[in-house]
Amino acid sequence: MKKLSFIVLAAALLSGAAAFAQGPQVKISNGTLEGTIDSTGVHSFKGIPYAKPPVGDLRWKEPQPAANWSGVLKADHFGNNAMQKNVFGDMNFRSSGMSEDCLYLNVWTPAKSSTAKLPVLVYFYGGGFVAGDGSESRYDGESLAQRGIVTVTINYRLGIFGFMAHPELTKESPNHASGNYGLLDQNAALVWVKKNIAAFGGDPNKITIAGESAGSFSVCAQMLSPLSRNLIAGAIGESGGISKLATLADGENNGLAFAKKIGAKSLDDLRALTAAQLLDSAAKPGYGRFGEVVDGYFFPKQPADILEAGEQAHVPLLAGWNSTEVPYQMITYGDAPTPENYVKKIKTFYPNNTDEILKLYPGSTQDEVIKSATELGSARFITYGTWKWEELSAKTGGQPVYSYIFSRPRPAMVASMGNARAGLAGGVVKGGANDAPSKMPPPYPGAVHSAEIEYALGNLGGNKVYNWGPDDYKVSATMEAYFANFIKTGNPNGKGLPQWPANKGSITQYININVNTVAQPADDRPRYLLLDQIANKK
């Protein structure tokens, strides 16, 4: 009897140990997933396939639904990152490696039940549509999950794999379109989330999309596309908006030119190449850059035309940019930032509007040149397109637009690490025709491109490069709270936060996010109206 009791007890202990070792499980449309429990109690499921691997005959095709599986799929590690070169020094992946087989997503959820119906965030990474991955620690979803939000990051195809158009591709497509595969991947991920997120405790009718840089362009694109605009309840854009896109014909010609340069006579020849061969060929100077096109399917017409017609998703929008997206050298190039050199550059960029630009972006002293060149360079790079998206959304979207400027500079580095995305940061720069090589003045102080990501998503601790202090954590708590409130309610305001005014009809007010976060009037509006006038001249 004693022996039997011991056996029963041992079996019970072993069973308990096995149960303890087992991670949380959810059943989705394709099968059962087993995730992990983070130290905060958040359940995470990583490396979930949301589409079939886009390899072989599926290279350059619309994403296909993921295959079902039997048994339990371990979702305890990130999937592969998309094919890409090491373009940006500040990207650090936790992926399983690089591969064309890259269509995976990750879910962090605080829910312990599928009936929780929590709000959902789907985040698109940045990287110029040539780099990036959903495994980066700065995009980690654990912090927002602790605030009651089911958080999702996704991977999508990049570069030549994600955006090459070609006449043969257009012909074989059931949608008579080609290119935009990376954007179609994002749409497929949204469809997957809509279908499956309830299993993780998420509300499929409460999906907000967000992203930074190319990720912000992606948010705008999904908001405008007839394929996605009915899938979302809100949108967050960080430094990126609309731009004028190439036509499908232009994209096809670009694809033909690339194929000719590498000696590929047909689509079969292109598909016969290895992923590494394609990546290396596309990276050669002068071999073409592959971008979004008006394909008649994902984009039925130009983004601005969709917004002007009010045909976008009519959902609340929270969007903005950083105070110093790029340094002044984006305008002055190798020349010293003197008033004389600045005027020459403005005449080159705006020969028909020199006086108007100089009035709104003055440069009578070196300090004024540095400030104005930073602001004008940032507008040319990304803030004008973001403003245009916000402005037209406020005009035709019928929903509030919450606009921000993020101006908290990063602290000093703990250890040296290059940040290619931040651009030039002063130092020795070769002079122009009238300038001997010299040490240029430092950049205008502020927040550079991509600096807000860790603050907004509560992930300062995951970045060991910078010496974050109490003020940084204060700014992060404020910005993450704004984001969390917006994801939950469509309004960023909440208890203990400075009031963030909404824009309707046009962009007249911002919130300036810094140690002392304050609302301010959009005094730069005349600048953007002038740039808009110049951009729309026939």
Image: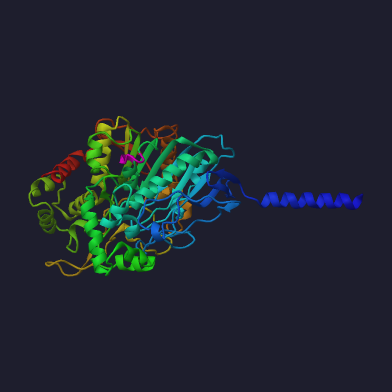
Give residue 497's quadrant in the image. Answer: top left
**Is residue 186 visible to us here?**
yes
Locate the C terminus by quadrant: top left
Nearest the viewer among 497 and 80 is 80
Percent across and percent down for residue 259 are 26, 65
* Secondary structure that dominates the magenta span: loop
Q: Residue at x 42, y 43 (%)?
A: 190
Percent across and percent down for residue 120 are 46, 39
User: Does the magenta portion include 224?
Assistant: yes
Q: Residue at x 17, y 63 (%)?
A: 335
Percent across and percent down for residue 332 are 18, 59
**Is residue 166 visible to us here?**
no
Nearest the viewer among 520 and 130 is 130
User: Does the magenta portion include 522?
Assistant: no
Left or right: 322 as drawn, with respect to 133: left
Left or right: 171 as drawn, with respect to 363: right
Percent across and percent down for residue 12 are 78, 49
- Of all residues shown, which one is farthest toward the right? 1
Q: How is the image coloured?
A: rainbow
> Which region of the structure is painted magenta?
223-228
Nearest the viewer among 537 and 497 is 537
